[in-house]
Image (cartoon, helix red, strand yellow):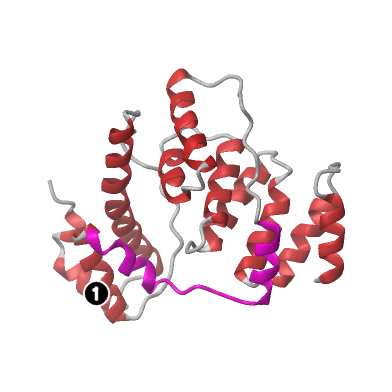
Amino acid sequence: MKNPIFMNSNLANQYFNNQLSESDELAFEQQLHHDMIKNRYEKLLQKEGLYVPKEPILKVVHRRFHPALKVAAILIVVSLAGWHVWKGCMPSKMSNFDVIAAQYLVEAAEIPQTRMGVTPQKEQNWAAFKQAYAAKEYGKAILLIQAIEPKDQDEYYYFGLCYLYQLDSEPVIAIQHLNTALKLGKKEAAWYLTLAHLKRGDKTAAKEVLQQFLALDLEWKRSEAEILLKNL
């Protein structure tokens, strides 16, 4: 059954011509993103023989596109083969700070070998995620960890790290997940949140989070953080 959003040509025309309200436009883009990703991620999980939730939990960053790019986005959703074209339309922010961040991201963060208090189904998906993460297949790892519900601080932490390590991804998505992990009590997330802000080119935000990280009772990465703060 087709989603009603694609059957409403008037809504699509309003979207192309920037006539929708901010909330309606965001809802439209969320539906596009949902339909594009859902098919890809469900196929991957089925191939791996893993549990497929009824609906994936998607975090979407809202952007205002030029009308011509909006048309291209619709066509890409209709044809999932155009996935890389869609990503090519997303602007990336590069700066000297991105180079600094890359120096600290050479080595991927380690994943705990065991965890307590998780269901067998959740642990099965976590095991598959760890395998993809260890192989640095971050696109696949993102799809696998997306299936884990409910998410705790560790899931959000590594969810953010995958977006941070993935070379062609938007750091703002990593920031979103790492922020959630930090709020849930994952102190280490503050270090990588600093690097995500640097990768995005936001020196001010990076310094604020780095100072927050140094105020925590952690010795992990402290010397590196102190050096980095002096250099910013």
Q: For the residue marked with disc 1, what is the amino acid?
A: Val
Q: Report the residue at 80% width, 54% height from top.
A: 212
Q: Report the residue at 55% width, 38% height from top.
A: 155
Q: Residue 99: within the magenta?
A: yes
Judge from the rendering whether residue 171 lies leftward or rightward of residue 64; answer left or right: right
Q: Is residue 15 visible?
A: no
Q: Give the range drawn in magenta.
A: 81-105
Q: Can residue 47 be seen in this view?
A: yes
Pick whichever, 60 or 83, lies toward us.
Answer: 83
Specify the quadrant that holds the C terminus.
bottom right
Where is residue 229? Give x, y as percent: 83, 64
Where is residue 166? Give x, y as percent: 51, 57
SS assignment for the magenta stretch, majority = helix
Judge from the rendering whether residue 128 lies leftward or rightward of residue 211; answer left or right: left
Q: Name the residue under label 1.
A: 71
Where is residue 4? Give x, y as percent: 17, 54
Q: Which quadrant of the view contains residue 77?
A: bottom left
- Give above or below for 22 relative to 108: below
